[in-house]
Image (tube, rainbow, N blue to C red):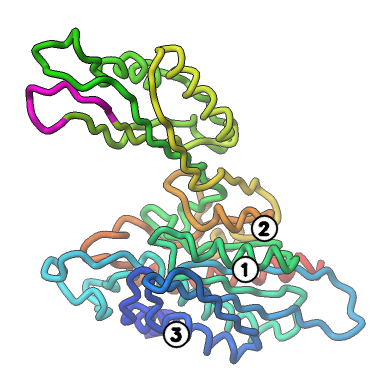
Amino acid sequence: MNLTFDLACELIACPSETPSDARCQEIIGQRLQALGFKLETVVSGPEDFKVTNLWAKRPATLTPGRAAATRLLVFAGHTDVVPSGPIKQWDSDPFKPTLRDGKLFGRGAADMKTSLAAFVVATEEFVAAQPETPLAIGFLLTSDEEGPALDGTVKVCELLQARGEVLDYCIVGEPTSVTRTGDMLKNGRRGSLGGKLTVKGTQGHIAYPHLASNPIHRLAPALAELVGVEWDRGNAFFPPTSWQVSNIHGGAGVSNVIPGVVVVDFNFRFSTESTPETLQSRLQAVLDRHDLAYDLAWTLSGLPFLTPPGTLVDAVVAAIGAETGLTPELSTSGGTSDGRFIAKICPQVIEFGPPNASIHKINEHIALCDVEPLKNIYRRALENLHAQLLA
């Protein structure tokens, strides 16, 4: 039907469940190489979980002697998808792209193979129209975003940082829109700090509590206090930091034994108003005040990042307005993304893509009417940054 649709279908047909890339990056790389991109494949991870990453870059193309500032825009995303779930529950094969009722169905249709196809075709159209440009373009793709994310984008970012590679702008193709492509973009994300708390007591017979110490009972007042803590009040871009318990486990599995330990898994989703260090310190102060015997293990999954309105946000907002007539909401909601790694080496990072209502679900899909506008928005963003550099 069109180039973006066709490429999206070709990518969806690749069963690239994490950490498999299933040739997606090879397909994209061939298109980019034809445009003058230099390709570099970075393979990382243990033997039983090999991750494929692609770093591709096309330098700025200016006539010698022409004065203009050069900048690098990177399109970033992932070629891996989550498992399909029970195939029998799908109305069509999840890895056989299917057009039905004005929608393209398939695993990865919304998250995020259509975005990747739109990146590529937008770049092809831009390069054809602007063979001479001060705007360098990069692609950073991984097959480890939906998994543990230990050997994907983070490894490429570490490599680029070690080389002194400067990234100026980055658009991550995550599905950020709500009901219509262009109604929301993410100009930041909250940080994620997880913890595993083990509170120690003394196991004993439930009929003789004076001979035991119930760690669940000892934890309860501290837990109630933690639930009521105001960690911060957020700011203009971030909601207040939240603290949530995800799992509590205690007991021997029988009704007549006081447990010796209780284990609590929890998570902070935190704004730029807090730091991991202050959150850790404040939580531990509550535990200490309640005189608990405990062990505590922390996992920092990502720091918060924010790109205020400026060069990149303005270019994408203008592109969305020109293509759709919408003014997108700037949001930092949702979970973490690979933007958290890129933000360490790139001062302006945003996420923008199609509606996300069907992602990770049975019968994942994208409306056909969202495909071409998505590509055009990416192309218009390139054009806006190109024009700004020449101004």
Q: Amino acid type of disc 1? A: Val
- Of the two numbered discs 1 and 2 on the same chain, state the one appearing first in sequence: 1
What residue would you read off at disc 3? 3
Give yes or no for contact between labels 1 and 2 (Cβ–Cβ under 8 Å): yes
Helix, strand or loop at mark 3: helix
The crowd level at tag 3 (other Cα within 10 Å; few <14, some 14-19, many 20+) is some
Q: Amino acid type of disc 2? A: Cys
Name the main secondary structure of what is drawn in magenta.
loop
Residue 123, disc: none
Helix, strand or loop at mark 2: loop
What residue would you read off at disc 1? 74
Image quadrant in which you'd find residue 211:
top left
- Tell me the residue at 52%/29% (across/down): 280
Image-based side of 133 in relation to 179, left or right: right
Q: Relative to residue 297, is residue 293 depicted above or below?
A: above
Q: Quick one: which residue is furthest to the right in this view?
A: 65
The stretch drawn in magenta includes residue 57: no
What residue would you read off at disc 2? 346
Q: Quadrant of the N terminus?
A: bottom left
Magenta-tinted stretch = 252-262
Q: Nearer the viewer, residue 249 or 351?
A: 249
